[in-house]
Image: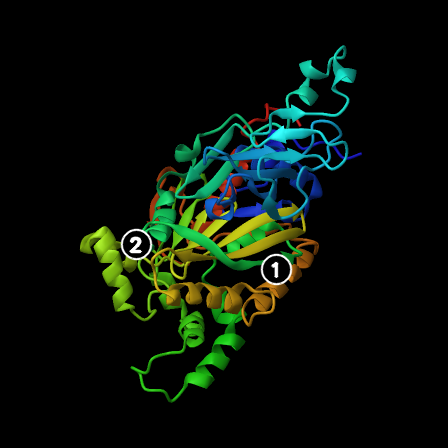
């Protein structure tokens, strides 16, 4: 039997400029991630617009634990354990729905208030003399203690230790502000369905790719070459169809991506495209800009619209695109299986064109049948297999490494700098061992 990994073993897998392949391959590590890493970090649960009325719920799984996000009668949102306190039956098996006033277990009809506390149970007198009311079975479903709702984005942390919500995310929350403030009312709504794709690779592989600006030139060469052939010969000032507007920038050269800039924050968060991005050239919508100015003022409107980062990562589960208004949610399933969700967001009070951009972008780039995502999926799944090859057990993260980079905290970097990825793995190591004693498995 293999020896259990200790705190020291785990830290040794993340070196200054490379990481060990076990971070992608090891099922033992993935099990420890569920218990430690994901439970110690703040993970995205859902959006408040998905549960508009009391009793509305969505189901989700975080760190292997089935959860319910449910709107309360007072308008607040709670995240509950999705299991009956009796035998463990999930109280909700659909992805979303409404229970109106209470949850009812389909197995033995135990019922619970919307906050998860017990309501009633059959044959109540049979429990009068037992110990049921003094233990977990008598206390109800159980609500998570650490839940934060920020601009209608709902996050949760399973463990009690570690930083609170604002200390954990810090300045990267500006990416969510920029997204929400693109609505003249500051409100967003999830619409258009959620594209879901299970990729047979480790979740960290997908997440680091979000900050990889070197791969589009080679990985997506066929898609961008086809777009260029279709558009060649058009006048420089010709209005581009939306699909062309979104795909052509993928073919920009290394210099473009390097100069777009990036920023790393503590705890693994990042922003790619601090100077400009492939989204910066979208056509202006004058009536929309006027609506924003009426709501936010000219100065704030200019600040909102001039910032179109390529990707902002709220580590470890959320990637934000403020323009187009789209998010990706990373849901790890196993060491070699990751559920990737692409969500479209409608900005309240904004023209339909903005929502159409979000839908179009998700279909073109993130749908498993798109002209872009199939390149990435093929590469991710091939890498997952290729890492098993002998001799070299390490994955290189050497580009633009500097010995003093860890001492600088939040810092701006060039857009092709692999510090954007090294920062993620350093945070992974930090939160993996945050609640592990020295020498203990």
Outermost residue toward the top in this view: 129
Towards the viewer: 219 or 248: 248
Residue 266 point in image, percent of width and height = 41, 39
Query: What is the secondary structure assignment of the residue under circle 2?
Result: loop
- Image position of 417 (left or right of 390): left
Residue 239 point in image, percent of width and height = 33, 80
Towards the viewer: 357 or 294: 294
- Image position of 45 (left or right of 283): right
Q: Which residue is mark 2?
A: 184
Occupied quadrant, residue 405: top left
Q: Image quadrant for the C terminus? A: top right
The dot on residue 380 is 1
- Image position of 94 (left or right of 40): right
Task: Tally the numbered discs.
Answer: 2
Question: Above or below — where is 200 with respect to 4?
Answer: below
How packed mark 2 is, by other alpha carbons closer than 10 Å (few <14, some 14-19, many 20 or more), is many
Occupied quadrant, residue 305: bottom left
Q: Image quadrant for the N terminus? A: top right
Question: Above or below — where is 113 with respect to 293?
Answer: above
Towards the viewer: 366 or 115: 115
Among numbered discs 2 and 1, the one appearing first in the sequence:
2
Residue 192 point in image, percent of width and height = 51, 61
Residue for point 69% across, 27% down: 85
Residue for point 67% across, 30% down: 111
- Image position of 183 (left or right of 360): left
Question: Above or below — where is 373 with respect to 160?
Answer: below
């Amino acid at each position: 039997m293999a020896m259990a990994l200790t705190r020291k073993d785990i830290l040794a897998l993340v070196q200054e400029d490379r990481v060990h392949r076990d971070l992608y391959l090891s099922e033992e590590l993935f099990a420890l991630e569920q218990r430690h890493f994901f439970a110690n970090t703040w993970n995205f649960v859902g959006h408040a617009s998905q549960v508009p009325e009391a009793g509305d719920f969505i189901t989700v799984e975080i760190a292997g634990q089935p959860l319910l996000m449910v709107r309360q009668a007072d308008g607040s949102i709670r995240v509950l354990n999705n299991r009956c306190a009796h035998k463990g039956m999930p109280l909700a098996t659909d992805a979303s729905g409404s229970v109106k006033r209470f949850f009812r277990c389909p197995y033995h009809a135990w019922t619970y208030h919307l906050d998860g506390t017990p309501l009633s149970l059959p044959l109540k007198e049979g429990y009068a003399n037992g110990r049921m009311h003094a233990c977990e079975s008598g206390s109800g479903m159980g609500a998570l203690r650490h839940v934060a709702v920020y601009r209608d984005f709902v996050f949760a942390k399973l463990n009690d230790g570690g930083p609170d919500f604002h200390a954990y995310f810090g300045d990267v929350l500006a990416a969510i502000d920029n997204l929400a403030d693109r609505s003249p009312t500051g409100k967003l709504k999830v619409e258009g369905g959620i594209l879901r794709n299970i990729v047979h690779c480790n979740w960290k592989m997908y997440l680091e790719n979000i900050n990889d600006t070197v791969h589009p030139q080679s990985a997506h060469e066929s898609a961008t070459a086809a777009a260029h052939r279709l558009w060649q010969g058009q006048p420089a000032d010709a209005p581009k169809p939306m699909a062309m507007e979104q795909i052509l920038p993928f073919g920009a050269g290394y210099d473009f991506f390097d100069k777009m800039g990036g920023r790393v924050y503590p705890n693994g968060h990042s922003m790619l495209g601090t100077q400009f991005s492939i989204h910066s050239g979208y056509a202006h919508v004058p009536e929309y800009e006027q609506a924003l100015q009426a709501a936010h003022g000219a100065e704030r409107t200019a600040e909102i619209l001039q910032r179109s980062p390529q990707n902002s990562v709220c580590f470890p589960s959320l990637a934000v695109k403020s323009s187009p208004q789209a998010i990706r949610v990373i849901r790890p399933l196993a060491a070699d299986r990751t559920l990737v969700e692409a969500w479209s967001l409608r900005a309240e009070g904004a023209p339909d064109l903005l929502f159409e951009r979000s839908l179009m972008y998700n279909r073109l780039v993130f749908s498993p049948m798109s002209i872009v995502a199939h390149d990435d999926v093929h590469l991710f799944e091939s890498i997952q297999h290729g890492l098993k090859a002998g001799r070299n057990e390490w994955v290189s993260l050497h580009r633009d490494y500097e010995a003093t980079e860890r001492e600088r905290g939040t810092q701006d970097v060039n857009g092709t700098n692999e510090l954007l990825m090294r920062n993620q793995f350093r945070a992974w190591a930090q939160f993996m061992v945050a609640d592990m004693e020295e020498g203990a498995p």
